[in-house]
């Protein structure tokens, strides 16, 4: 199945509507609320693709943005290691607790470097760049821009993405926006190949932070970042999703806000499967990005991403509650809570 054929199964405008609840296996820490949206597809205009770098070894490595308390990055790496047991896949995960005063991003990457092709998760970044440009010009989005943005996120429409990719100035416009949003490791795809943008799980959480932060000193709330109206608009777009694209971050709870991306590489036949978004557990908000490549099939990739999301959010949620209580609440191995399916 080619990229274009697969995309046609998921990108019809008729599929756009408010997503319902999808049944998922319970995660360790019972999820109470998670806003959501998701949409994804592979770009139709990428006939000449780059070769994804091959994985390098099987050793796990935690990469941290500053020293999180009690080595949260190490904890994240430990709980994710069993997830990869049955896969020969590259994976990176990053998580941020928005209600943690430290505001540190914990991340872990496996089997190779930490850069991945975005596929359609780049569409959130494109909308953010478009809104920043509109802010600078002191205007709202045009009717054409609004329609394209809604189609691009809600049904992951590629024609709409092509239009807005050109509108923002392609990779140069994306870079200008990302310099303001604090994304330091994202390089736009060349020419029309927006789906081959390279990014890291850490940068995707930085992007989510620019959208979902409610206030404070983050770039999202500064004069250079997205203003409250722009953030609310992206959140609203990410709160609507075609029902048949309900997978990925939505595995963590019945409510979610997210965007997915998938792409079969013509050079290898293997799949890029990504999911980014916000989740809420026990009244606390978390941002999560899961990026993967070298998946044997889309089904395998979706399964891997969903297991990684549930494991990562469960571990970080348990870690946050342990910090709040000031002592360990049970086993020192966070996998115990995850595997038993509840508190």
Image (tube, rainbow, N blue to C red):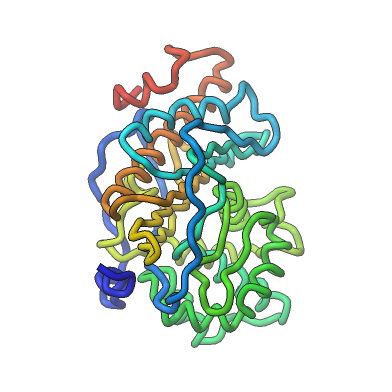
Locate residue 165, reporting x and y percent: 55, 78
What percent of the width, then of the height, locates residue 7? 31, 71
Residue 289 lies, with reference to residue 148, above or below; the image says above
Task: Tell me which corner region of the image, top left, top right, bottom left or bottom right, holds residue 4.
Answer: bottom left
Q: Which of 186 and 72 is in front in this view?
A: 186
For the point 49% across and 81% down, the residue is 162
Q: Can residue 285 be seen in this view?
A: no
- Asked if 239 appears above or below 134 in the picture, the reply is above
Please name the residue shown 54% across and 27% down the image: 320
Is 156 situated left or right of 223 in this image? left
User: Where in the figure is residue 177, as x and y percent of width and height?
Assistant: 68, 67
Does 7 sit left or right of 99 as displayed? Answer: left
- In the rendered image, is residue 287 in sight? yes
- Report which quarter residue 11 is drawn in: bottom left
Residue 241 horizontal side relative to residue 126, left or right: left
Relative height, residue 222 to residue 113 (above, below): below
Q: Which residue lies furthest to the right in this view?
A: 223
Q: Please give the count of numbered marks on the rendered protein.
A: 0
Q: Residue at x 52, y 25 (%)?
A: 75
Q: In terms of depth relative to the viewer, which is nearer, 272 or 177?
A: 272
């Amino acid at each position: 199945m080619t990229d274009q054929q697969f995309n046609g199964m998921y990108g019809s405008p008729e599929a756009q509507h408010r997503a319902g609840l999808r049944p998922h296996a319970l995660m360790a820490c019972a999820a109470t609320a998670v806003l959501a949206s998701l949409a994804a597809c592979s770009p139709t205009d990428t006939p000449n693709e780059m070769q994804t770098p091959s994985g390098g070894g099987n050793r796990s490595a935690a990469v941290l943005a500053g020293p999180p308390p009690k080595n949260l990055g190490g904890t994240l790496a430990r709980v994710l290691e069993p997830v990869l047991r049955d896969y020969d896949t590259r994976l990176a995960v990053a998580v941020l607790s928005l209600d943690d005063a430290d505001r540190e991003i914990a991340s872990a990457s496996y089997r190779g470097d930490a850069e991945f092709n975005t596929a359609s998760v780049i569409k959130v970044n494109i909308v953010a760049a478009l809104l920043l440009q509109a802010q600078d010009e002191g205007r709202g989005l045009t009717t054409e821009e609004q329609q394209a943005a809604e189609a691009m996120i809600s049904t992951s429409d590629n024609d709409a993405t092509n239009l807005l990719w050109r509108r923002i100035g392609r990779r140069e416009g994306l870079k200008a926006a990302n310099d303001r949003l604090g994304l330091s490791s994202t390089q736009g795809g060349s020419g029309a190949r927006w789906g081959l943008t390279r990014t890291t799980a850490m940068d995707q959480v930085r992007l989510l932070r620019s959208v979902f932060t409610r206030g404070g000193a983050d770039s999202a709330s500064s004069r250079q970042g997205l203003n409250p109206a722009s953030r609310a608009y992206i959140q609203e777009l990410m709160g609507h999703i075609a029902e048949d694209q309900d997978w990925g971050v939505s595995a963590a709870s019945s409510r979610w806000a997210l965007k997915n991306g998938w792409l079969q590489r013509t050079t290898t036949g293997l799949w890029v499967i990504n999911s980014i978004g916000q989740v809420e557990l026990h009244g606390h908000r978390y941002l999560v990005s899961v990026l993967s490549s070298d998946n044997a099939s889309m089904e395998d990739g979706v399964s891997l991403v969903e297991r990684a999301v549930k494991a990562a959010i469960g571990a970080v949620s348990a870690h946050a509650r342990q910090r709040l209580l000031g002592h360990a609440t049970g086993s020192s191995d966070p996998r115990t809570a995850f595997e038993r399916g509840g508190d």
